[in-house]
Amino acid sequence: MSVINPSIVQAVVKSFEGEAKAVAKARIVQDKAIQGALDAMFIACDKPKAEFLKGNAKSNEARGQIKSMFDAIAEAGYISKSSAASYQSAFWIAFEQGVEFKRDLNNKKDKSEGEAKASAKASGAVQSTSRTDLDKTLSKAMAQARLLGLTEFAAELVDLCIDRLDGFKETVLAK
């Protein structure tokens, strides 16, 4: 006895197709709205981009506004916090490169030659450490990211350290 006939299966499959199409249309609308925010940021940029982007979400008003926008979407429950962070990264990559917003821009970034060489080297084993040493190491990682042109990653790392590590301050590296 066959309960689930081909027409039932086809109806179920068709219903999922409808959902996929609706989601794709919604994403187009969402990306267009985010592009509007990106366009506004392009207009507001009244100095070289490197200077305009200097700092993090706490010290740079533009970065703070974009972080707040994506955080609000996550707080409303429409996306996860990690998606909000990912979209925020994609926003700043689009801004830096002067391209259209695409939510997966940060996933498409190619490894530079410097990154490939850096990942081939071992950083060494940690035998003992202190909070001061951790702050220095994180500050060094931020400096390295900036040297590789990963300014958005460096800014996110600064934000993360400030948010999660009490009293974190980016240090001047000393040997």
Image (cartoon, helix red, strand yellow):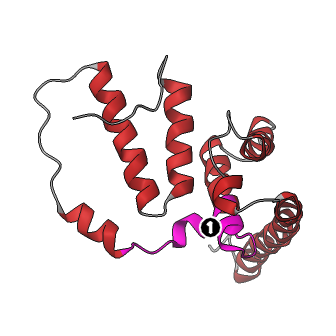
Which portion, as a residue range, is magenta? 92-112
Image x and y of residue 127, in percent: 10, 28
Q: Let me know if residue 109 appears in the view.
A: yes
> In the rendered view, does 124 fall on the left or right side of 44?
left
Q: Residue 24, relative to residue 45: is it above or below?
A: below
> In the rendered view, does 82 fall on the left or right side of 128?
right
Relative to the observer, which residue lies in front, 34 or 80? Answer: 34
Image x and y of residue 118, in percent: 26, 62
Q: Is residue 97 magenta?
A: yes
Q: Amino acid at mark 1?
A: Asp
- Examine the image and state in which quarter residue 25 appears: bottom right
Please state, as top left, top right, bottom left or bottom right, where the C terminus lies in the image. Answer: top left
Relative to the observer, which residue lies in front, 46 or 59? Answer: 46
- Residue found 17% across the figure and 49% down from its top: 123
Q: How many marks?
A: 1
Circle 1 crowding by C-alpha within 10 Å: few under 14, some 14–19, many from 20: some
Q: Residue 153, relative to residue 114: is it above or below?
A: above
Image x and y of residue 51, in percent: 66, 54
- Examine the image and state in which quarter residue 55 appears: top right
Q: Which residue is mark 1?
A: 104
Q: Residue 110, relative to residue 93: is it above or below?
A: below
Relative to the observer, which residue lies in front, 59 or 156? Answer: 59
Relative to the observer, which residue lies in front, 2 or 105? Answer: 105
Q: Residue 127, relative to residue 138: is it above or below?
A: above
Q: Is residue 52 magenta?
A: no
Image x and y of residue 145, in percent: 42, 55
> In the rendered view, does 165 fall on the left or right side of 72?
left
Please state, as top left, top right, bottom left or bottom right, where the N terminus lies in the image. Answer: bottom right
Q: Let me know if residue 78 appears in the view.
A: no
Dot 1: what SS?
A: loop
